[in-house]
Image (cartoon, helix red, strand yellow):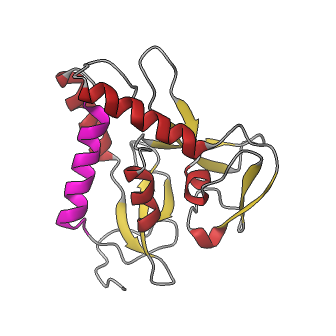
Amino acid sequence: MKHELNFMPEINGLSGYRPLTLSEFARLKAADKRATAHLHPKRAERLRDKRQGRWPVPCVDEDGTDCYAVPLDDNHTIHALVEAADYWKLRDGGADGLWSSFSRQNGRDKQVQMKIPMRKGQPGHWASPARLILDLSGGRRVVYLDGDGLDLRRKNLAQTFGYSRGNSTSIARRGAERRDKLVAEGCSVGFHA
């Protein structure tokens, strides 16, 4: 479905931006509430405001696929591009931390990472949204076909054998299970957002 409304500047060479739909707005608001439910109310409110400032911008890529341009910093100077279905797969699967970018060894190749929330007193784990999208197990790694680590569309992702720290999917699932258990028990301490 191609959207004709162009009201935003070009990001990552894309156009066809549109406002969030009411259902997208409600899902994002619910995900932010779920991700901050374990925090003190004032801290949770501040973090929800920050998270809302980093909500994805709906767009359509050159193939007509519904995508999101996900801000990776608070100033919206760098964005990741991900298909809408994959974005919600990650969010609904418990990987609801803020996305950010980091540079590989040479300092030029940027990639996307997200924090998987864990219990208080334990550090959260960094996970690769690309690994989660491809549902990779340990011993496999992601290859970006066009060399752009910020393009997380499936057509740009492939897998190969190689060193990997572990299974990002199981880390995300365990983090979501622990968070939900603490929230159900009424704990006000728990995970890092």
Q: Is residue 8 left or right of residue 158?
A: left
Task: Tell me the residue at 66%/42% (across/down).
Answer: 103
> What percent of the width, then of the height, locates residue 158?
70, 65
Q: In this view, does 151 lie to the left or right of 146?
A: left
> What percent of the width, then of the height, locates residue 67?
43, 69
> What percent of the width, then of the height, locates residue 13?
52, 72
**What is the quadrant of residue 89 in the picture?**
bottom left
Residue 28 is covered by the magenta coloring: yes
Is 117 situated above or below 189?
A: below
Task: Tell me the residue at 31%/18% (across/down).
Answer: 189
> What percent of the width, then of the height, locates residue 140?
75, 51
Q: In which quarter of the image is the N terminus?
A: bottom left
Magenta stretch, main secondary structure, is: helix
Q: Can residue 185 be seen in this view?
A: yes
Q: What stretch is highlighted in magenta?
A: 19-37
Q: Is residue 101 visible?
A: no
Task: Tell me the residue at 25%/37% (across/down).
Answer: 48
Q: Is residue 90 left or right of residue 133?
A: left
Residue reaching furthest to the right: 162
Which residue occupies the foreground of this view, 39 or 108? Answer: 39
Residue reaching furthest to the top: 121
Which residue occupies the foreground of this view, 173 or 104? Answer: 173
Is 21 situated above or below 34?
A: below
Residue 31 is covered by the magenta coloring: yes
Q: Quadrant of the C terminus?
A: top left
Q: Is residue 27 left or right of residue 71?
A: left
Task: Tell me the residue at 35%/67% (across/down).
Answer: 58
**What is the quadrant of residue 160 in the picture?**
bottom right
